[in-house]
Amino acid sequence: MKKIMPVYGTRPEAIKVAPIIKALQDADDFDCVVTVTGQHREMLDQVNELFGIEPDHDLNIIQPRQTLNMVMAKTIDGLDAILEQEQPDAVVVQGDTTTSTAGAIAAFNRGIPVVHVEAGLRSFNIFSPFPEEANRKMTSQISSLHLAPTSVSKANLLREAVNEDDVYVSGNTVIDALLDVVDKKVPFEDEALQNVQKAVEGGQKLVLVTTHRRENQGDAMRGVGRALARLSETHPDVLFVLPAHKNPVVREAILPFLEGKTNVVVTEPVAYGQFTHLISLANVVLTDSGGVQEEAPGLGKPVLVMRENTERPEAVTAGTVRLIGTDEERVYNEVTELLTDSAAYERMSNAVNPYGDGNAARRTLSAIRELLGTGKREAEFDDGLGN
Ligand code: UD1
Ligand code: UDP
C-alpha cells in the first residue's frame, strides 16, 4: 500500500481534488490520508460534506482578512508535524492557491514527492492573477509529477524545461466533479433560488455572477457592482443571481450597489451540486472564477470573464469564453449584447469541453502509480486541440 496525502484548503481545490480522493479510497493499493488546512472554512466544509469526505487532519488556519503570509506560514508550520507523523509516499496539491504552494514546499522540504494537479496553467503575467501565477510557477519548480489538464498546459511546462517524462496530460478533474453532480439537478435549498428556478422555467432570463479575485478587489469590483446595478435597471425582466463569496472585502465592495434591486438575488455560497444546477439554468455567466470558466463552457453557456488575461485560453479559442476585463462600461455593454442580440448569443453558446472527459481522476492514479514504481500510466487525455 502506498500512502498518498492530498493537502487542500479552499473551495476550488476541494472540488477538484474530491474525485481523486474518491478514486484513492476505492483503490486497493492506496491508503489516502486527507489533510485540509482550513484556508477556507464554510466554503471548504460545504464541498467535503457534499462528496462525503472526512479529513484526517485539519489545521483550521482561517482568520478574518488573513494575509497571504499568514496562510503560507501557518500551513507550512502546521503541515510539518503531520508529515513527520504520517510519512506519506507522496503529497498531492491542486492548483495555485497559497495552501497549494505551501503544501508543496512543506512536502519538498521533507523529501516527499509532490504531485501537482492542474499543473502548467500560465497567464504569463506574474501579477495577474495575484498571487496565483507565482504560486503555480513556484510549485512547478519542486514537483515530481506535473498533471497538466490539457495539451496547452503541458506545452507551457515543456517550454519551461520541465522534464517531459514528469509531465502527463490527465484532463481536469473539475469535469469529473461536474459530471458527477450536474445531471442530478440538485434541488435548491434556498427559497430565493427555488423562485429563480420557477421564473427561468417560466421563460425569464438568468445572468449568473461570481466574483472574488484579489486583483479585482477595490475599484474594479465597485465598477462591476455599478454595472450590475445599471443592468438590473435597464433589464427589469432579467434575473441576476450573485452567490456572494465569503470574503468580507468582496461583499463590502459589491453588495451596497445591489441593495433594493428586486431582480437581483444575492445568496450565500451555493453548495456545489446546486451551483452546477444554477449554471445549467443560466443564459449568461459573468465571472472572474477559474473553475466556473471551465465548467460553464461544457454546459454550452457563454462566459464573460472579468479579467484582463486568462491561464485558461482553451475555451476562449473555442469561442465560448470572452475576456472582458472589469471596466464598468464594458461589462454593461457585453452583458447587454448577449441579452439582446440573439446572433451574438448563438455564436458563443456552443458546448465545448477541452478541459476533460470525466476520467481525469482515474488517469491521475495511473500516473501516481508510475511515479511510485507500482504501475504504468494510461494513455494521456486527448483534448482535441492538437498541441
Ligand atoms: C482563495 C485563493 C484563490 C482562489 C479562491 C477561491 C489564495 C491566495 N487565494 O482566495 O486562488 O481562487 O480562494 O475562492 O490562495 N472566508 C470565510 N469563509 C470561507 C472562505 C473565506 O470567512 O469559507 C473569508 C475570510 O475572511 C478570509 C477571506 O475570506 O480571510 C479570504 O479568504 P482567502 O482564502 O485568503 O482568499 P480568497 O479570496 O478566498
Ligand atoms: N462554486 C460553488 N458555489 C458557489 C460558487 C462557485 O460551488 O456559490 C464552485 C464553482 O462551480 C467552481 C468553484 O466553486 O467549481 C470555483 O471556486 P472559486 O470561484 O471560489 O475559485 P477559483 O476557481 O476562481 O479558484
Image (spheres, helix red, strand yellow):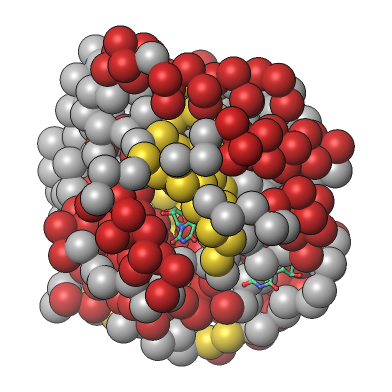
- Foreground of the two, 269 or 77: 269
Q: Is residue 140 left or right of residue 53?
A: right
- Foreground of the two, 199 or 3: 199
The quadrant holding residue 379 is top left
Give the residue at x 45% y 40%.
Answer: 237
Residue 130 higher or lower than 264, as above or below:
above
The quadrant holding residue 384 is top left
Give the residue at x 37% y 65%.
Answer: 195
Residue 51 seen by the camera: yes
**Where the N terminus falls, by quadrant?**
bottom left
**Where the C terminus falls, by quadrant?**
top left
* x, y percent for residue 349: 28, 24
Residue 211 higher or lower than 177, as above or below:
above
Q: How many marks?
A: 0
Residue 175 seen by the camera: no
* Quadrant position of ligand 1: bottom right
* x, y percent for residue 96: 59, 47
* x, y percent for residue 337: 48, 17
Give the residue at x 17% y 41%.
Answer: 357
- Foreground of the two, 168 or 299: 299
* x, y percent for residue 95: 52, 49
Give the residue at x 30% y 10%.
Answer: 343
